[in-house]
Amino acid sequence: MTIFTRIIKGEIPSYKIAENDKFYAFLDINPLQPGHTLIVPKLPEPEADYIFDLDDNILSEMLVFSKQVARGIKTATNCKRVGVAVIGLEVPHVHMHLIPINKEGDMSFSNPKMTLPAEEMAEMANSIAKAMEK
């Protein structure tokens, strides 16, 4: 069982932004930018490790779910764009990064990761979730 499956099941706490029956969105605990969000599919074990191994319907639904979350991120962070990255080497569970950016360098994974206070993380997750409701 991956760390993401444990987060989805509530065994590990997260800063949840959105959830439906197929996907879970939560803040990255070591973001590149405030509002950096992970989108993970709720998968049966063993979890799919590579995004292009997903069923076509799940892959397309994941992108549509991510679009809704990205709109909330853009509103809550007032960024120019929300960048999308799929690397998939860090955790063996399909996941997509949504990162608020104002310039290309904001999305570089070689940048130092941030550590933000819990209150700031909770406030950001709440702001994004509320922005999605509009």
Image (spheres, rainbow, N blue to C red):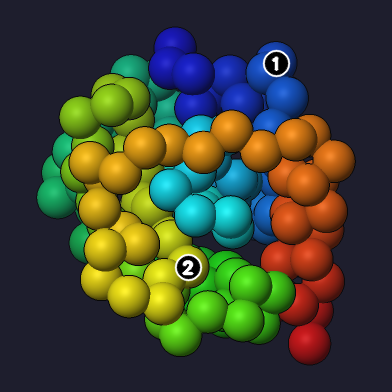
Q: In x, y percent, where is residue 42?
A: 50, 39
- Label 1: state its secondary structure: loop
- Label 2: state its secondary structure: strand
The residue identified by callout 1 is: 11
**Residue at 68% of width from left, 18% of height from top?**
12
Q: Which of these two is toward me, 120 or 26?
A: 120
Q: Residue 27 carries which label?
A: none
How many marks the image carries: the answer is 2
The residue identified by callout 2 is: 100
**Residue at 85% of width from left, 41% of height from top?**
119
Residue 71 appears anywhere in the view: yes
Q: Quadrant of the N terminus?
A: top left
Q: In x, y percent, where is residue 32?
A: 43, 48
Task: Give amino acid for label 1.
Answer: Glu
Task: Give amino acid for label 2.
Answer: Pro
**Residue at 74% of width from left, 56% of height from top?**
124
Q: Which of these two is toward me, 117 or 90?
A: 117
Q: In x, y percent, where is residue 70?
A: 52, 73
